Image (cartoon, coloured by chain):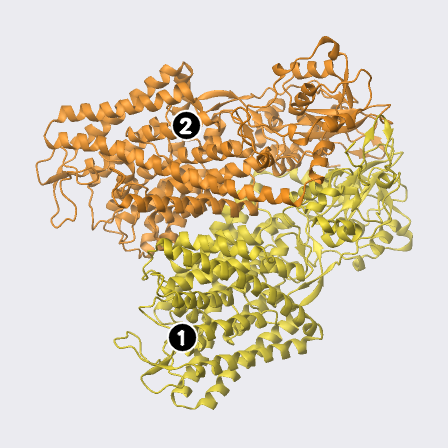
Chain colours: A yellow, B orange
Amino acid sequence: MEYQRDENDIEIEGGEMADDKEFLRGPLLVRNRKNTTSQIAIVGANSCPIESLDYEILENELFKQDWRSRKKVEIFQYVFLKWTLALLIGLSTGLVAFLNNLGVENIAGFKLLLTNNLMLKDKYYQAFAAFAGCNIVLAIAAAALCAYIAPAAAGSGIPEVKAYLNGIDAPSILAPATLFVKIFGSIFGVGAGFVVGKEGPMVHTGACIANFLGQGGSRKYHLTWRWLRYFKNDRDRRDLVTCGAAAGVAAAFRAPVGGVLFALEEAASWWRSALLWRTFFTTAVVAVVLRGFIEFCRSGKCGLFGKGGLIMFDVNSANANYSTLDLIAVIFLGVVGGILGSFYNFCIDKVLRAYSIINEKGPIFKVLLVMVISLLTSCCSFGLPWLSQCIPCPPQLAELCPTAGRSGNYKNFQCPPGHYNDLASLFFNTNDDAIRNLLTSRVEKEFHISTLLVFFVAIYWLGIVTYGTAVPSGLFIPVILAGASYGRLVGNMLDDLSDLDVGLFALLGAASFLGGTMRMTVSLCVILLELTNDLLMLPPMMLVLLISKTVADTFNKGVYDQIVKMKGLPYMEAHAEPYMRQLVASDVVSGPLMTFSGVEKVGNILYVLKVTGHNGFPVIDEPPYSEAPELCGLVMRSHLLVLLKGKTFTKQKVMTGSMIVNRFRAHDFAKAGSGKGVKLEDLDISEEEMEMYVDLHPITNTSPYTVIETMSLAKAAVLFRELGLRHMCVVPKKTGRPPIVGILTRHDFMPEHILGLYPHLHHYE
Amino acid sequence: MEYQRDENDIEIEGGEMADDKEFLRGPLLVRNRKNTTSQIAIVGANSCPIESLDYEILENELFKQDWRSRKKVEIFQYVFLKWTLALLIGLSTGLVAFLNNLGVENIAGFKLLLTNNLMLKDKYYQAFAAFAGCNIVLAIAAAALCAYIAPAAAGSGIPEVKAYLNGIDAPSILAPATLFVKIFGSIFGVGAGFVVGKEGPMVHTGACIANFLGQGGSRKYHLTWRWLRYFKNDRDRRDLVTCGAAAGVAAAFRAPVGGVLFALEEAASWWRSALLWRTFFTTAVVAVVLRGFIEFCRSGKCGLFGKGGLIMFDVNSANANYSTLDLIAVIFLGVVGGILGSFYNFCIDKVLRAYSIINEKGPIFKVLLVMVISLLTSCCSFGLPWLSQCIPCPPQLAELCPTAGRSGNYKNFQCPPGHYNDLASLFFNTNDDAIRNLLTSRVEKEFHISTLLVFFVAIYWLGIVTYGTAVPSGLFIPVILAGASYGRLVGNMLDDLSDLDVGLFALLGAASFLGGTMRMTVSLCVILLELTNDLLMLPPMMLVLLISKTVADTFNKGVYDQIVKMKGLPYMEAHAEPYMRQLVASDVVSGPLMTFSGVEKVGNILYVLKVTGHNGFPVIDEPPYSEAPELCGLVMRSHLLVLLKGKTFTKQKVMTGSMIVNRFRAHDFAKAGSGKGVKLEDLDISEEEMEMYVDLHPITNTSPYTVIETMSLAKAAVLFRELGLRHMCVVPKKTGRPPIVGILTRHDFMPEHILGLYPHLHHYE
């Protein structure tokens, strides 16, 4: 008989019960295991307790009644408000994006103008002092905001938003303080000349705005409105935050379709067709708002806000014809870009781990670290251009050469009059302008190979060491900068072999780096198309993205996934791991499991709430309320707290459902915004009340999702993930045992937990 | 007490059991209801029996063993093959799209050349005879193929593909015969001058190709390969068909990103991030293949294959600046476009219903109907241009005027030399060329208002009456034609008010019609952008799409949804209907429910398989195999048939699991392609064997998804739909009753069934 009997397998043959003791563990609840995975994760640059979000439709008596009594006008109110909120998210995100650009352009413009003028007067030391001084002051401002007010605002924010949309909540991820710091920290950080982008922060900002609007008003400030109560649940908030994230990308890149796709491909874990349309509407609003502001600024009312404002790189002028030989160059570009991109991820991970040790020591160390990096960046930006040779100004230029004003791209630097320094044109500029320079076609601008090499190496490493400091810092722009300089470098080297313009090579290089680090495909493709307004480059861009992603995937995970994992956020993957097929659901259930009776003593409930951190408790009806013990349902911690606060207790152990149904309304139990709601400390229960009883039936979700204990863990994980659950009840196969074996939560599906319990499964990974 | 007790609600108060008899129905299985929804639907132009697809992970002993024994090399084989198949789908779809274009361009080119030359010689009657004759011959060819070989190939095919991806299978939807007829029928149909597109048929073709490749080889033709066995399940086939549908759109419009989005927004019901990438790869391959062929044809080796080949409308030349006043015009365009679009849907529905009566009478009536429509189309195309006035040829044209060759756009028609007929330029052309003419900017081409009006009205109605005849007919091109002429008409009328070019008005008009009929958003936006290569039109295009979709949604459903419903395909919507909240799962379970024992008599199984059409049967273990009756799992009809064919029977009622495990291999039970597999008639069981027993445990799925009978129907529907189930077990709340109440299938969630049982719920709709 070839069939090998597995230890954890049940098989009944010839009527004989096989050795299933190991597996079924008799009629006892599973109490011998404890889930030791951390309930704390790093959000931004700070450790926070985390919670799961719950997307299940809770069906208890109170909610059911509320549903059934909903009138058509209330459904209309809900739909109307949903779209109004989408509109508001679009408007606010567009406005913030514009203010961000206005701030950065004016601050950086003033700084560059000042320094450039001093340089033109040959006052090199003063110029450096002014440059580095401005940078460090701005850097300290950004770092202080981050370190002292909202540490959650540090970093890109995309990993946190991604985790939130996967169902992981921490009070600080989308808090108003985070929003405030993200907006101003990003302006100061980008203005300080760091190699950071504003795209990640914009996504986070959009998500924060959406969450703020979805709070359902504020009782503290008397800003409540009856209509807003519909949004007091995790499902609707998730939808709003998805719209916010899409609006953020749309605003950062002026790429409305790209924003929708980014939300779909990278940010969101659950997606519905209806959401596609609402997200699309939000990003359309953003596009219209931005267009309006740009029209407004065209008349010169926005200070130093130049054409460098909202990035939009027109490369239309270049020749987009390519031959088969060019495709080979493109493939080479993609392969090397993939390798460099995955190495970028590797370095980011190492640097982040090193920084987290420094950041842990306290806010002042965070600020000091930022100061060091700022000084390093200033030295590079100011020092490296000295390596470059001076180039005579090309004749017949539309622009002034060397540059006198703010936004020109022919920086004189140390060169004699009539000459310019091409490395300074890249370094001594805002990041957006540097990208624009790199993407211009050869006809308009030529860079030396050495210039590109120096710039590429410096930007590659500066980008890596800057991420992870306590400033809001996006990853898109550093990666695009490094990728574009790499692409242009390759284009310059393959000059004799390829007819493709170096500007297009730079674009493809940027695509290869983005594919190699972020591992997105369709959304990056569309974002780059919308940025460069050149559809003819679509086929080679697709090719480069596919190749670089494939190559990079063989080395490590995408940068956001990697950061999510490093920060300890318990992210549920869409697919089940192979080793999950070797286990069944009851193998990973962890105890001790606390259950309540249908009518429970108040003291017991309080005790259980105090000693465990669990959020869902099975309610079991026992005789005389039923013939045999049976699972009545699941009750939530937050609902218990509201119920206890209401003090609808009885001296006798009797069902008082109708009393409670009359006493409370459904929205008393609606989920409060993250970090709000009744807390255990708010309760004031007397000794006498401790001995009284409370009927849990009206607030018990009578139809929790259940799986049988013999279901494979892989199948249970698919159910858990597809439905976005927080709790999943595991029920026994045999009758005559307690009606519930345990509860599976997100943490029980984490590899650390499973492989900790079953180390021999490591080889299936 | 305000709390109203609902009839279908259970509530226990004060320990007393409320009147739940109505609801719990005692310990009996539900046998008093029958699901009368039809198991037959119209596919193409024919009625077929339909089945559900099953995306559940079946966990029986055989399959579990197969999983556990899978080696790393086998996982690699699977992944490698998955990508190879995606590549093959891309290559084949690209090739077919090219052949389709080559065929249409040459056939239509020959026809137009012949007619045009006769017209230039003033031989009007011969010209009409040649024109109408060619058309009717081609039409008969297309109709005969459709009517006699594969009726499923008629129509667009998108509704059928959409239904397949929602989990509805009919053997003919994606059969090889359908593929064959779809390819050639589409060439003849478009060549015959019908107002039909090749886009819907291309989507269907792509899906058919994907399904063909995913069959897992063919035993009949000895084309089996061990690796292909991994694809013998509905999940992997669904993924392939999704890729195929995306490849179809990508090939039809040369819009790779649009293809991915189309599959995502309109076609697919389930989506995973991993699929996004594979779909993107497939469409990239299509784009590369098409580009290669076009390069090849540029050298003139493709006969009459002109620039009219693969559509790509460059409108870049037009001025895309627009003011606020233009936006008002755009809004007006969107509103009216939405109304006209939804009216289009309304008419399509009526016409389809009328035609289905004719089509039912037999193939010859189908052909006759096509002949009538063909004659009508010929008369319109040939007759209406006589209404138009002759226009003198503009001087300094690059093109010849009047047109002498095939692809020119200045048709002389009845006009004197040196003049052309602008209505003939639209009518007397291929549909692609007509669209291109409509989208050109005013500078290049001017149409009279009367010309546009006549063309718009004629095309609008011709499009409506042509769809539903027995030819492969896409809806995109008719809608774009009508929309573009409507847009250009509006643009001409608003000439004094708006600076926007009429070509751009035509584009926006096409967008408004597409939004009004198809109700897609992002995908249409991207498809139109890729078609016209003009990103600057993105914001107004988004606006127009949003407005027209919103307006049209107030009247009726999207055209594909409407056709799916009209054809009787039991489509599972993503959201639960409001009335489902008033019911619980056990309210709609329909009987009689057939169950098997763990070890069952062969005769009983055969009897049950004969008398019911069910596909899943609960297996219940009874004493002595268990202490009390308990649900062992679910067994599939197809697995039972394979097991019975293997004849592993015993005389005694004993468990013989290991015998069966040794006798069979997992892939014996793999799901055969649609319409294949063991049939009941194939079994040859003797009288003696009828009395023997067979052990069902090894093929029983021991972890079917279960819901408790008191779960609201809405919640159950979400579970059913999100996981793509075919069967869902409803278990009782109380112990001591039979362990299963019933099985829910797709048909039990259909409004006809539910509202038939509970007519009073109609007012919740």
Which residue is at 61% across, 29% downward?
B671
Name the residue tied to disc 1.
A303
Mark 1: amino acid: Gly
Q: Is A531 on the left-hand or right-hand side of B764?
A: left
- Label 2 marks which chain's residue? B
Which image quadrant for residue A707? Answer: top right
| Residue A292 image-quadrant placement | bottom left
Check disc 2 and report its element: helix, strand or loop.
helix
Q: CA distance from mark 1 to mark 2?
A: 65 Å
What's under tag 2, amino acid-wise? Phe
Q: Is residue A467 above or below residue B154?
A: below
Say which of marks 1 and 2 sits in front: 2
Q: Is residue B431 above or below residue A574?
A: above
Left or right: where A22 falls relative to A206: right
> What residue is drawn where x is 51% and y is 36%?
B241
Where residue A193 sits: x, y (%)?
A: 50, 76
Report the quarter where the N terminus of chain A lies: top right
Pointer 1 and pointer 2 on the same chain: no
Q: Chain of mark 1?
A: A
Q: Position of residue A167 (x, y in %)?
A: 66, 52
Helix, strand or loop at disc 1?
loop
In this orientation, which residue lies closer to the viewer: B38 or A758?
A758
Mark 1 Cα-neighbour bin, 10 Å: few <14, some 14–19, many ≥20: few
Asked whether, in this view, residue A4 is left or right of residue A226, the answer is right
- Spot occupied by residue B329 in the image (x, y as percentages of width and height): 32, 49
How crowded pointer 2 is (Cα within 10 Å; few <14, some 14-19, many 20+) is rated as some
Would you place residue A304 above or below residue B643 in this image? below
Q: Is residue B533 visible?
A: yes
Using the image, tell me which numbered label, if any, was put on residue B180: 2
Query: Is residue A94 visible in this depiction of the protein?
Result: no
Query: Which residue is depicted at the point 91% across and 55% down?
Result: A687
**From the viewer's perspective, is residue A565 above or below residue B419?**
below
